[in-house]
Image: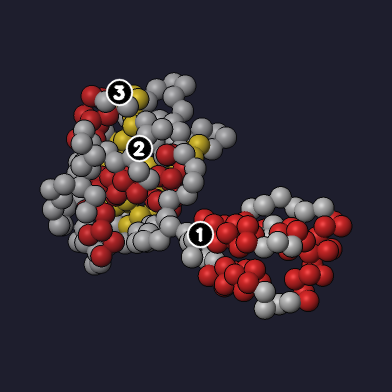
Amino acid sequence: MSIQSTVDRIDAIRQALANPATMIAARNPLTGGAEAPAEATTAASTSTSADASSPFASALTAASASYEPAQGVAGLTSSFAPSSGGTGSRIVAAAESQLGQSEMPPGSNESPAIAMYREATAGAAPGEPWCAYFASWASRQAGEPIGAAGEGLGSVGAIWSWAQSSGRAIANGPGVVPQPGDLIVFGDEHVGIVRGVLPDGRIETIEGNFENKVAANVRSASEATGYVSMT
């Protein structure tokens, strides 16, 4: 029974009752009614307690028994639940959730986790270098997929070209400070994710396919050739 149905049913009973005290008693919290004055509530309590089998009491019992609170959203199937922060923090959280995932065997560019990362990139091929697949996966998990159509990108060159065409490319140089969640690019060879910036300017990163695994790293400020803004 819905709350509105309960309200309608109680209102109908209240109109049928001649006893004013019983009518005041009908102002139950389930109906959303205002709180009755203390003296009227006392009188109503005396009346209803004397006859627990009254029509109103029966209706109220039925309403209380049938009331069910709203349930939370169901159906979240992803193994990673993005945090409630901004895009950058969600990308970092996704990347952090995979720290330690490694190739099986080392040097193969393969594992169940790497196969999952490939799913975020259209046309991804087994056995290929996977740093760009990992960046594409983390970005998609955060709700900010990369690529002109959000299709993910499988090479560092493709990521940088997309960044340039979309106004996201930031060439590294004096005074450039990336934001957490930005992609960090090393020429055409490698891409990772900025985790944070240390007080001395060094860049904390999370990188897929670094020494055959997803690894946390610290880079000097001059190592990157550029960044891709994701915020």
- Secondary structure, mark 2, is strand
Residue pointed to by mark 2? 183
**Where's residue 84, x and y in %?**
49, 46
1 or 2: tag closer to the N-terminus:
1
Quick one: 20 or 179, which is closer to the camera? Answer: 20
Q: Which mark is residue 5?
A: 1
Residue depth check, mark 1 versus mark 2: number of the one nearer the observer: 1
Disc 1 and disc 3: Cα gap in Å?
A: 55 Å
Residue at 34% across, 32% down: 228
Q: Is any part of residue 188 visible from this angle?
A: no
Please say if the residues under marks 1 and 3 sit with CB atoms less than 8 Å apart: no
**Where's residue 159, x and y in %?**
24, 35
Q: Is any part of residue 75 visible from this angle?
A: yes
3 or 2: tag closer to the N-terminus:
3
Q: Amino acid at mark 3?
A: Gly
Residue at 12% across, 48% down: 123
Residue depth check, mark 1 versus mark 3: number of the one nearer the observer: 1
Please say if the residues under marks 1 and 2 sit with CB atoms less than 8 Å apart: no
- 84 vs 183: above or below: below
Q: How many marks?
A: 3
- Secondary structure, mark 1, is helix
Corner quadrant of residue 132? top left
Residue at 35% across, 43% down: 143
Q: Amino acid at mark 2?
A: Leu
Corner quadrant of residue 91? top left
Disc 1 and disc 2: Cα gap in Å?
A: 54 Å
Q: Amino acid at mark 1?
A: Ser
Residue at 41% across, 32% down: 231
Residue pointed to by mark 3? 167
- 104 vs 83: above or below: below
Q: Which mark is residue 177?
A: none
Relative placement, left or right, of 68 versus 110 is: right
